[in-house]
Image (spheres, coloured by chain):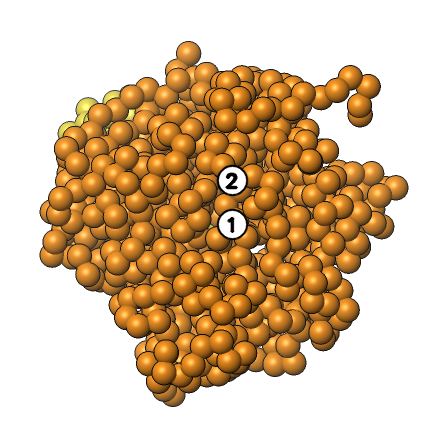
Amino acid sequence: MSLKGYVGKILYVDLTKQKSYVEDLPTSLAKSYVGGSGLAAYLLWNLVDAGIDPLQPENPLIIATGPATGTLAPSSGRFVLVSKSPLTGVWAESHVGGAFGPQLKYAGYDVIVITGRASRPISLIIDDSHINFYESSGIWGLNVKDTVNELRTTFGRDYHVMCIGPAGERLVKFASVMVDYYRAAGRTGLGALMGSKKLKAVAVRGSRDLEVYDPDKYLEVVEDILWRNTVGPWALPAQLSLGRYGTSNLVTAMNAIGRLPTKNHWTGYWELADKISGEELLKYRVSRGSCFSCMIMCKHITRVSSGKYEGTISGGPEYESIVALGSNLLISNMDAILYMNQLCNLYGLDTISTGKVISFIFECYEKGIISKSELGGLNPTWGNEEAAIELIRLIVERRGIGDILAEGVLRASEVIGRGSQEFALHVKGLEVSAQDPRGHKSVGCTWAISVRGADHLRSLTTVDELGYRDVAAERFGWDKVDVICDRLSEDYKGMVVKDQEDFFALVDSIIMCKYGTMWPPMYYFDFIAKLLPPLTGIEEFGDVRYLRITAERIANLKRCFNLREGVGRESEKLPKRFTEEPMPTGPSKGQVCNLEPMLREYYKERGWDYNTGLPYVETLERVGLHYVVETLSKKYKLPRQERGND
Amino acid sequence: MGLQGRHIRIDPKLCTNCGICELICSFTKFKVFNPKKSLIKIYYNYELGFLEGITVCEQCGSCLAVCPTGSIRMADGVVLIDHSSCTGCLKCVNLCPHEALVVVNGKPYKCDLCGGTPQCVRFCVRGALNVS
């Protein structure tokens, strides 16, 4: 049978030879790995050998969509970039919105696998089946906005563009890939990967039909989606929070529970948080926008219309950017935050990592580890917006201290030494996102076990953070609700994190947005079991048990990718700040994160051995990863579950 | 321009460029997802965040006069095409002052207000679309 919902094609591109070819997407792969992140995990596992240098031409950039992409599935305008990370050397995955992903499917491809390295700058222009390798020396060096405008002027206004800015070209290790001007695949430094391939941009437009298996039944699902977003219980909460303010709404909420990262995560509460709140940001908003096929519509464009930063106009900033460039640096001037956000969007920098390397330097300077002369006369004191802006420029231009910081906070702290490692906040080399495990204990487990490093989007639990008691009860039982919803308790959090990791592995493969699946928790496994069968015609997807096994298969495969690279249990730890320094101020005062009990519970739930950090053979076989057992057994002695053990 | 009937209008301040009107239109009319086949098209400047324009049939009836086979008629203010007698000469497409006709498999298609309940209006969560 031919696959519906999917296009059923994978495009392979070799930049070295400037050749491309198309292969069919086997139905068996769609059944086992769904699409998106799951399918990309399978492809990456088979395409690269362990130990490959991320910037080697053979390391592929996988651009993947899922079966939901381009259909009316909820918030499904997204796609994912997958590779081995230039920043961390482990699994890299970054999701992004806009309308590029759907266009890719309308052009006739589910996935693009890009390998090789062009001898001169190049862009890939895809117009249905026409693949054009466009010589791009003329646009190399341009910022993101100019690049997109240049390509859309040359080829047509209906093209959607993903590209890198100067940061990616200069191999800044946390460079982002920008899509449709302002949407960012920010994390894990895939902009540097594109830069190393001399690939400036990929532009795509498509005109083909995307068919569904059972249109009448699918229309019923679509009606249900409309109901949930207009009448259902989550419709109003979603519109009043995400809809009205975008993610910036979280600033006030997180400050209220003592979880707003402030001063390089020194504390979780800031007296001046009101100055950078969602309400404040509304004053700058010129329009409310949306990614493709989304009913939540949390995006916005903001402008500074007076003062020193007059003329600043860009998409966002999101909660993560406001915190990384605001409270994290004690900068309360919203104008300056918007300006820095614009710089990052134009240069193609991840705002989270950028903010965290700057706060690292600020703290090093405060503690006397680094002197003014080493910083070229810069005065990086807390709240100094000029210094922060100058540091962003230095990073992109790789001048002076910027050249060191451009390698990410882990490598920068190793170069600087002198005890600065203590202030380098990362897990597996990825700078921490805007949560705090002391004020929200499950975040500790989420960060530690996350396959791409300290990051919230692979398994963040919101039932405890935002107090969704009914949802927690429905999923885990009323008897556990009080403990699960207690954000300051470590109990049951390993279990909840494992459940979220599985669910998000599936969501990231279908691909839907976290808004709707995480915040608010509008959709869960049961909805996906209704969505996928009429869309794809794959009956198995209608069984929640099958979906859960599939989700586990994907989650396990990603973890095993890191294991194959030799990165396992020892990398799953938190910076001392969160486990040893009690929260000094605010509502979470006195708290530290006790990681090990959560990890132990997580390993048990996952079916992995806590002591060795390796998966039980039985676990991998149960989820159908026999080939992974074979590969990993060459490197490790995989444990077996003893009889009688629970 | 002939009779000005009720047709789909947009409030540019409310449109967010989510594209759902285009998706539900192509799905309702052709059972596929393909914005290029949508009978309503949104042109949005996502660099600066504003609606540049929209093309959708305004039910003006200008095309009635050019149809050589008389396949286009007006009923209750809605212009309808009878595809069984349409020969696909596409004179109506060339004439349309709003460029609102879409050619699919050689035949012209246009917004018929979904027989009274336009799906694009129903699915516009922001309420940017209306019939008036």
What letter labels the chain drawn in orange?
A
Quarter-of-image position of residue A240 = bottom right
Residue ID for mark 2: A567
Closer to the camera, B72 or A364?
Answer: A364
Dot 2 falls on a residue whose secondary structure is loop
* Residue A420 on image: x %, y %: 51, 68
Tag 1 and tag 2 share a subunit? yes
Closer to the camera, A217 or A204?
Answer: A204
**Distance from Cα at disc 1 to Cα at disc 2:** 9 Å
Residue at point 25%, 56% (across, down): A169
Q: Label for residue A102? A: none
Q: Chain of mark 2?
A: A
Residue at point 42%, 11% (across, down): A1
Q: Is residue B53 left or right of residue A358?
A: left
* Residue A126 on image: x %, y %: 22, 38
Closer to the N terminus: mark 1 or mark 2? 1
Question: What colour denotes chain B?
Answer: yellow
Q: Are marks 1 and 2 in contact (CB under 8 Å)?
A: yes
Q: Is residue A642 left or right of residue A9?
A: right
- Mark 2 packing: few (<14 Cα in 10 Å), some, or many (20+)? some
Residue at point 80%, 47% (across, down): A491
Q: Is residue A347 left or right of residue A361?
A: left
Mark 1 residue type: Lys
Compared to A391, does A195 lie above or below? above
Compared to A312, does A570 lie above or below? above
Q: Label for residue A428? A: 1
- Mark 1 packing: few (<14 Cα in 10 Å), some, or many (20+)? many
Q: Quadrant of the C terminus of chain A?
A: top right
Mark 2 residue type: Val
| Residue most extreme to the front | A418
